[in-house]
Image (tube, rainbow, N blue to C red):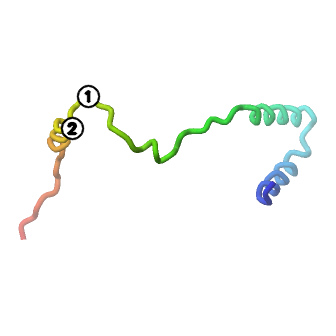
């Protein structure tokens, strides 16, 4: 166990040591259940960000749509 984790567990123990037996057993049960749950890992890999765009529109049509949807709000001021 790393020093930081050991310090955290010691702090929790000091906080919880004066609880009654029933409460301690309930906490043990809940902690045990949380440890037994399978850890689901998300695929946060950068590789998931790359790849082909899955649409039925052609590339030319998509480019036209993007250009058409552009709006410019910049105003040129006279000097």
Question: Taking 4 as reference, is 12 above or below it?
Answer: above
Is residue 9 rendered to the left or right of residue 67?
A: right
Residue 44's tag is none
State the image quarter where residue 23 is shown. top right
Task: Tell me what residue is drawn at x 16 percent, y 57 percent.
Answer: 74
Task: Tell me what residue is drawn at x 20 percent, y 42 percent.
Answer: 66
Q: CA distance from mark 1 to mark 2?
A: 9 Å
Name the one closer to the observer, 35 or 13. 35
Task: Tell me what residue is drawn at x 83 percent, y 36 percent.
Answer: 27
Name the one closer to the observer, 60 or 2. 60
Task: Tell me what residue is drawn at x 76 percent, y 32 percent.
Answer: 36
Question: Taking 55 as reference, is 44 above or below it?
Answer: below
**Residue designated by label 1:** 56
Q: Quadrant of the C terminus?
A: bottom left
Image location of residue 53, percent across then percent down? 32, 37
Which secondary structure, mark 1?
Answer: loop
Residue found at the far top of this picture: 56
Is residue 22 rendered to the left or right of residue 66?
A: right
**Residue designated by label 2:** 59
Residue found at the far left of this picture: 78
State the image quarter where residue 55 is shown. top left
Residue found at the far bottom of this picture: 79
């Amino acid at each position: 166990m790393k020093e930081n984790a050991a310090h955290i567990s010691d702090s929790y123990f000091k906080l919880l040591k004066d609880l009654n037996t029933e409460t301690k057993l309930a906490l043990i049960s809940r902690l045990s259940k949380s440890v037994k749950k399978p850890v689901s890992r998300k695929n946060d890999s950068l590789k998931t960000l790359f790849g082909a765009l899955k649409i039925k529109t052609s590339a030319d049509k998509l480019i036209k749509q993007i250009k058409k949807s552009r709006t410019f709000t910049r105003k040129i001021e006279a000097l």
